[in-house]
Every structure is written in structure tokens, then in C-alpha cells.
């Protein structure tokens, strides 16, 4: 399979470039939105020590998003800050699951946030993220291989962190168990969106940018199956994608309000230094 | 305090770490966690956000037997120059009488040179 | 000090004398050491307030974390607010160890905060309505905090000194983060400059208040003298405020900003800054929980603590394995 060493090489092949930018937006927007949701938790986590640990993970993810946006910048898609702050919601390629709010309320007022949802969403997402990154280590786009290797270094800690929380809460009190099961159900309804690579997935797989969707899904499901077995849970049917496929630009209204918050200041004067 | 709901969550752990593989373990600080696993997960980002770290240990504080103040004050002792090099300062002059230089620490430890 | 008597055989007076000898000799007191009750009380008051102020201080800046203008600013302010939480963690641990012999722990600290018994710094009761406030907080509120924290690095209480050492090491990053934000705005367009000036106007009085009243006459009570005798601190409130003014006023002016106090000037004869004294009754109102944003911030903290109570209960050892 042909490899592409630089952005210039990728740009010479329009079909390749289109699939590549599509995937980069998926990777960037996933981390960007979940890091944003995590940053809303800042100061509100169940425990001060955990607040500090959680924030590191959110910073790491925001940093990973930045690395992908920079790759897009190299491909002529625009400035990283513009890409993250000025695109309209339908241009975003994140999975719907990652844009959903942390609970009811707002981060400034009456946030009724659900820690079980935070643990399950982050844990399952990190499992999928790691599987994708492992696949990207041999991507036909060489600059993406380098990015994947860098990101992987930090993901192992994230995984250890969320795995510990998941295992401990699911095996604790009845109330915690119930809350965790509810969170799993919630996450399950949308998780297929995280595993999807969207309409351009076939081209991505064919040109070796990332492995095909089915392979990645299988790996994730088999991993989650063993997690469930350990915790005495049952894997029901496959995860779903109830609110649409974010990879194809389908989103809930919560994305729009998230983007309004994220870009409130930048939009005032994008050309200025901040 | 055990009747206060949730307060059993707050167990004290002491955190130790080493900077490099070759460094000795060093005490860092303490944190509250419900158990060892979470203590470890949280220790990393609470105390090593910027500096490099090669290993981390967490120890439950209640497992540490510390000295009491009386015992600590009992650690102070008189100088014992017979077990320190400073008790042998006169040797330099002695060797000079034999037209020899006194071995430096490096000379004495010379066997360890690689 | 009587070297011939074992410490545990000393009378209370001898222990006190021994303790004061150690203070005077510049020794550091550790958590398990004998200490007079008023030394313990002073430390708990000082450090618990310092610690909880860091936790509450994360909230006004946190409002701007998701809204920070660029990817770089988002990362930097997240790291900065995280550090504040981390500083709170360090300081609360120090306070908790002092409270342990009294049968208290973090749960009590939180409940004291919610009931209003435990106060936090006046600056964190203020509203932060624009991104300019995020800049002013990081530059000047942190600048003021650095001045009072470095003063206490030499404190006689060992664990507090060690926590402060860790904290001060990170403050350099915070100061530069703040400088970077306000410089970008000062060099920006008219709207950005105005935003910055408005923030300075909003925060100036609170910044002067931050160091506390000049003397007892202003408040009716002050722990300054005792804290100096026990070598918990080495400078008075006013000395710290003067340091702050010397350090920052020339810079604020250099940026072309106006300080909202036309009486402010440096008196060459007295070698002191003259300024319009803040209304100390208002200060009292603010720190007792009646500031412009006190109720909302406390509510946010209380609600999130209660919302997540199930997590702490689930992992309490006596409740574990209930299923």
C-alpha cells in the first residue's frame, strides 16, 4: 500500500486527502468535545484529589485535539483556532455521544452532573481511542503515525484512571451499581457513533489511513465483553446510534450550545491576538 | 466520625516517588483516598503534573509506625569523632613528615573506579 | 530547656517553654509535635482559610475555562485552575492533620464552609463577568497571593512551609499566564482594551482589601501579633499591601491603564503609597458571605458536593461489598 510522507503528497491525491481530512476532523472533534465536557466538571468532581487528576486528562485530550487540528492546518484546512472555534455545528465530525451534556443544568448554574455517566463515557471512549490509535500506528499517512504514537503515551494513564473508577463503582453499593448501569445504558444508545468512521470510512480503509470500521468495532466489543464478564454484567445487543451519525454531520442541539460557549470570546475578534 | 456519611472515604495515604530509575525513593506529600488503587491513580496528577517521575508508591498512613516526640528528641546525641573523618585531621601533617601525601577520599575509594 | 528531662515527663509549662525555645531557635514544628492550643488554633484558622480559598478561588476562573479564546488559552487556564485545586489539596491536607486530634476531617471542613463558619478570601466573592476578569485575576489576584505566600515560606510550621514551597514553584507559571493574557488585550483592539480597563475598575478595591485591614482599629480583632510572635508570618498586612503597590502600580500605568483612585500616589517623604482606604465594613460584609457572588459560588460548591455524595459513600470501606 502506498504511504504518504508529507501533507504535500497527500494533497496531490484529492480522494485520499478528502478521506484523510475527514478522519482528522473525527479524531480532533472527538477529543475537543469530550475535553470540553470534562472541563465543565472542573471544581465539581466528587473529590478534590480527583478533580486534579480528571483535569489532567481533559488537558491531555484538548492537547490531542490540538495536535490533530495542526495536522489539518498543514493540509490547508485553515488555522487550528479557527477550525476549533468558528466551524458551524454541521461541519463537526465528533460522535454525538461526546457532545452530550454531563447531566442537567449548566456548568455555571445548578449543574446536576452525573459522575457515573462521566466514568462510563470516558472509560468506553478511551478504550475505543486506544484501539484506533494502535491502528493509526501503521497508517498510510506517516505524519499521523507520529501523532498517534505521541498520543498513545498519554492514553495509558487515562485508561488506568477510568478503569479503576469503573471497576470500583460497579462493584460497590447497590445505589452505585444502579447508577452505573443506567450510565452504561445511556452510553450504549450512542456508542456506535464513536466506532463509526462515517461515509468516507471505506475510502479510509482502502487507502490504509485506518483499518475498517468492522475490525475496530469487533476489537472494542470483545474488550468490553471481557470487562462486562469481570463485573458480572451482560452484553446485550450491539451499541446503537440513536441520535444520528456525527461523522456525517448529524448532531443534537446540544452541540450548538456547546460551540457557542466554546467560541464566545474568540468570535468577538478572531483576527486579534488573545 | 464514622457515623458521618461518606467520611470513611477520606483515608490518609503517604506518597513517595523517585525521579529517575537511579534516584532513591523520596517522600512527597499526603492525600486522601478510599483505597490504595485510587490513591495511586490520583497521586500521579496531584504531585507530578510537571516534573518527571519514574516510580510512585502509596502507603497507608496507619501502617507507618512513627517516632514519638520523646523518641525523636532522643535522637540528638553527642559528637562521635572516632567514627567520623573529622577526628583524623592530624593525619595529613603526620604523612608529610614521611614525605607522603595523605590519601584523598578518591584515592581510598580508588578500587571502585571503572 | 531542660535536657535532662524526657519530653514526656515535662510539665505543661516546661513543654511550652521548650516549644518557644524551638520557635526562637528557628526550628520547624511538625504535625505530631506538642504545640500550645492557640498555636494549633491559629494554624487551623490560617491554613484552612487559605486552602478553602484556593478551592473557592478556582470557581471564578473556572467560569472562563470553556470560553477561553484559543486552544492555547484553553489549555493554559485549565492547567492554572487545576493548580489552584491542587494547592487547595495541599493546604487542606496540612489543615486536616492539625484538626485530626480534634476529631475532625475534610467532611467537617466542607460543612464549615457551607455553614459559613469557614471563610474564604474576599476576592473570590466577586463576579467575573468578562474574559478581562480572567486576565486580572491571574495577573493581579495571583500577584497579591504570591506576595503573601512567599512571606510565609519561612513559617515555623514545617508542613505549611513545605506546601507553600510547592505552591510558590507553580505561581511563576500563573503570573506569566496572567501577564500574557493582559498584554494581549492591552495590545489588542479598542474593545479588548476597554474590557481590560473595566476589569481593573471592578477589581481594584478588592485587591486592596485582599491584604486585610491595616490594624486592629479597622476590624476590632486581628491575629497579626500572635502570628508574628509564633513566626507564622513575618510582615504586617500593610507592609504586604505596600509591596504589592510598589510591584504593580508602575506596570499598570505603563500599560496606559487607569487605576480607579485619583488619590493614589507615592509619598516620597514617607516612602509609602497613599491610597483611598477601602470601606472595611464592606470587606466584613463580603467575607461573611454577603459579597456580590458569595451565595452563588457557595451553592455551586455545596450542590456539587451533595450531588456526588453517593460516590464517596459507595467507596467508603464500611459500605463496600454491599452487593
Image (tube, coloured by chain):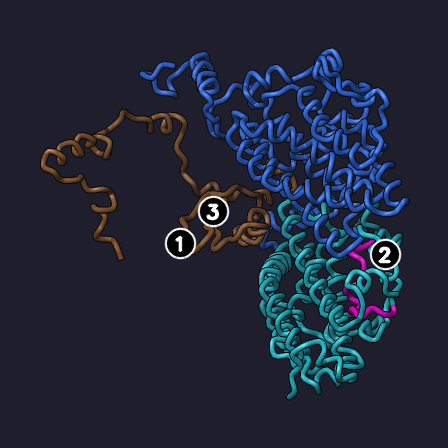
Chain colours: A cyan, B brown, C blue
Chain under label 3? B
Answer whether residue C223 is visible to the viewer in this image: yes
- Please give the range of residues in magenta: A90-104
Q: Nearer the viewer, mark 1 or mark 2?
A: 2
Residue A196: x %, y % from top left:
75, 76
Chain under label 2? A
Q: Which mark is residue B22?
A: 1
Mark 3, residue position: B16
Characterize the local packing of mark 2: few (<14), some (14-19) or many (20 or more) Cα atoms within 10 angstroms. some
Magenta stretch: includes residue A101: yes
Q: Residue at x 47, y 41 (%)?
A: B62
Magenta stretch: includes residue A52: no
Q: Label 3, secondary structure: give it.
A: strand
Q: Are marks 3 and 1 in contact (CB under 8 Å)?
A: no
Specify the quadrant of the image occupied by residue A199: bottom right
In space, the residues marked 3 and 2 are separated at their CA atoms by 46 Å
Amino acid at each position: 500500500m502506498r504511504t504518504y510522507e508529507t501533507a504535500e503528497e497527500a494533497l496531490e491525491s484529492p480522494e485520499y486527502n478528502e478521506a484523510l481530512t475527514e478522519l482528522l476532523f473525527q479524531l480532533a472533534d472527538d477529543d475537543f468535545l469530550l475535553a470540553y465536557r470534562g472541563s465543565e466538571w472542573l471544581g465539581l468532581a466528587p473529590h478534590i484529589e480527583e478533580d486534579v487528576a480528571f483535569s489532567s486528562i481533559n488537558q491531555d485530550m484538548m492537547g490531542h485535539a490540538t495536535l490533530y487540528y495542526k495536522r489539518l492546518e498543514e493540509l490547508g484546512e485553515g488555522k487550528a483556532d479557527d477550525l476549533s472555534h468558528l466551524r458551524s455545528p454541521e461541519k463537526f465530525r465528533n460522535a454525538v455521544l461526546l457532545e452530550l451534556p454531563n447531566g442537567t443544568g449548566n456548568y455555571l448554574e445548578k449543574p446536576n452532573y452525573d459522575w457515573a455517566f462521566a466514568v462510563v463515557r470516558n472509560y468506553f471512549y478511551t478504550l475505543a481511542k486506544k484501539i484506533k490509535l494502535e491502528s493509526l500506528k501503521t497508517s498510510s499517512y506517516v505524519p499521523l503515525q507520529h501523532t498517534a504514537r505521541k498520543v498513545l503515551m498519554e492514553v495509558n494513564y487515562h485508561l488506568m484512571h477510568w478503569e479503576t473508577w469503573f471497576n470500583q463503582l460497579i462493584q460497590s453499593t447497590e445505589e452505585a451499581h444502579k447508577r452505573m448501569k443506567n450510565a452504561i445504558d445511556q452510553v450504549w444508545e450512542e456508542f456506535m457513533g464513536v466506532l463509526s468512521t462515517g461515509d468516507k470510512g471505506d475510502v479510509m480503509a482502502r487507502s490504509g489511513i485506518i483499518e475498517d470500521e468492522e475490525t475496530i468495532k469487533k476489537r472494542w466489543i470483545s474488550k468490553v465483553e471481557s470487562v462486562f464478564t469481570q463485573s458480572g454484567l451482560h452484553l446485550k445487543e450491539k451499541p446503537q446510534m440513536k441520535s444520528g451519525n456525527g461523522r456525517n454531520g448529524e448532531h443534537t442541539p446540544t452541540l450548538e450550545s456547546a460551540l457557542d460557549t466554546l467560541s464566545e470570546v474568540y468570535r468577538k475578534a478572531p483576527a486579534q491576538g488573545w | 466520625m464514622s457515623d458521618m456519611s461518606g467520611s470513611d472515604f477520606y483515608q490518609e495515604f503517604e506518597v513517595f516517588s523517585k525521579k529517575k530509575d537511579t534516584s532513591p525513593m523520596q517522600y512527597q506529600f499526603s492525600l486522601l483516598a478510599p483505597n490504595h488503587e485510587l490513591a495511586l491513580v490520583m497521586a500521579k496528577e496531584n504531585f507530578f503534573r510537571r516534573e518527571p517521575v519514574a516510580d510512585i508508591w502509596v502507603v497507608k498512613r496507619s501502617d507507618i509506625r512513627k517516632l514519638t516526640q520523646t523518641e525523636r528528641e532522643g535522637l540528638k546525641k553527642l559528637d562521635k569523632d572516632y567514627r567520623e573523618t573529622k577526628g583524623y585531621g592530624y593525619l595529613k601533617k603526620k604523612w608529610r613528615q614521611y614525605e607522603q601525601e595523605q590519601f584523598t577520599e578518591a584515592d581510598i575509594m580508588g578500587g571502585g573506579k571503572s | 530547656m531542660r535536657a535532662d528531662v524526657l519530653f514526656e515527663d515535662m510539665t505543661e509549662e516546661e513543654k511550652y517553654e521548650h516549644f518557644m525555645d524551638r520557635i526562637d531557635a528557628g526550628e520547624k514544628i511538625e504535625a505530631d509535635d506538642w504545640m500550645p492550643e492557640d498555636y494549633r488554633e491559629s494554624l487551623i484558622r490560617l491554613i484552612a482559610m487559605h486552602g478553602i480559598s484556593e478551592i473557592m478561588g478556582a470557581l471564578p476562573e473556572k467560569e472562563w475555562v470553556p470560553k477561553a479564546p484559543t486552544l492555547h488559552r484553553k489549555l493554559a487556564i485549565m492547567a492554572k485552575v487545576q493548580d489552584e485545586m491542587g494547592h487547595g489539596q495541599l493546604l487542606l491536607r496540612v489543615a486536616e492533620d492539625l484538626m485530626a486530634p480534634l476529631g475532625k476531617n475534610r467532611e467537617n471542613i466542607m460543612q464549615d464552609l457551607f455553614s459559613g463558619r469557614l471563610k474564604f478570601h474576599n476576592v473570590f466573592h466577586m463576579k467575573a463577568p468578562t474574559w478581562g476578569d480572567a486576565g486580572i485575576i491571574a495577573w493581579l489576584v495571583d500577584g497579591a497571593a504570591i506576595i503573601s505566600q512567599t512571606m510565609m515560606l519561612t513559617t515555623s510550621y514545617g508542613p505549611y512551609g513545605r506546601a507553600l514551597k510547592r505552591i510558590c514553584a507553580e505561581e511563576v507559571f500563573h503570573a506569566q499566564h496572567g501577564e500574557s493574557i493582559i498584554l494581549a488585550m492591552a495590545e489588542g483592539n479598542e474593545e479588548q482594551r476597554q474590557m481590560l480597563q473595566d476589569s481593573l475598575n471592578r477589581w481594584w478595591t478588592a485587591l486592596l482589601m485582599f491584604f486585610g485591614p491595616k490594624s486592629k482599629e479597622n476590624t476590632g480583632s486581628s491575629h497579626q501579633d500572635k502570628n508574628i510572635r509564633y513566626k507564622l508570618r513575618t510582615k504586617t498586612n500593610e507592609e504586604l499591601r505596600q509591596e504589592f503597590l510598589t510591584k504593580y502600580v508602575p506596570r499598570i500605568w505603563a500599560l496606559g491603564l487607569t487605576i480607579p483612585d485619583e488619590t493614589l500616589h507615592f509619598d516620597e517623604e514617607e516612602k509609602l503609597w497613599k491610597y483611598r482606604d477601602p470601606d472595611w465594613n464592606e470587606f466584613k460584609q463580603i467575607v461573611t458571605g454577603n459579597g456580590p457572588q458569595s451565595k452563588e459560588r457557595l451553592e455551586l460548591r455545596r450542590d456539587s458536593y451533595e450531588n456526588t455524595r453517593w460516590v464517596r459513600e459507595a467507596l467508603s470501606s464500611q459500605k463496600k461489598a454491599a452487593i
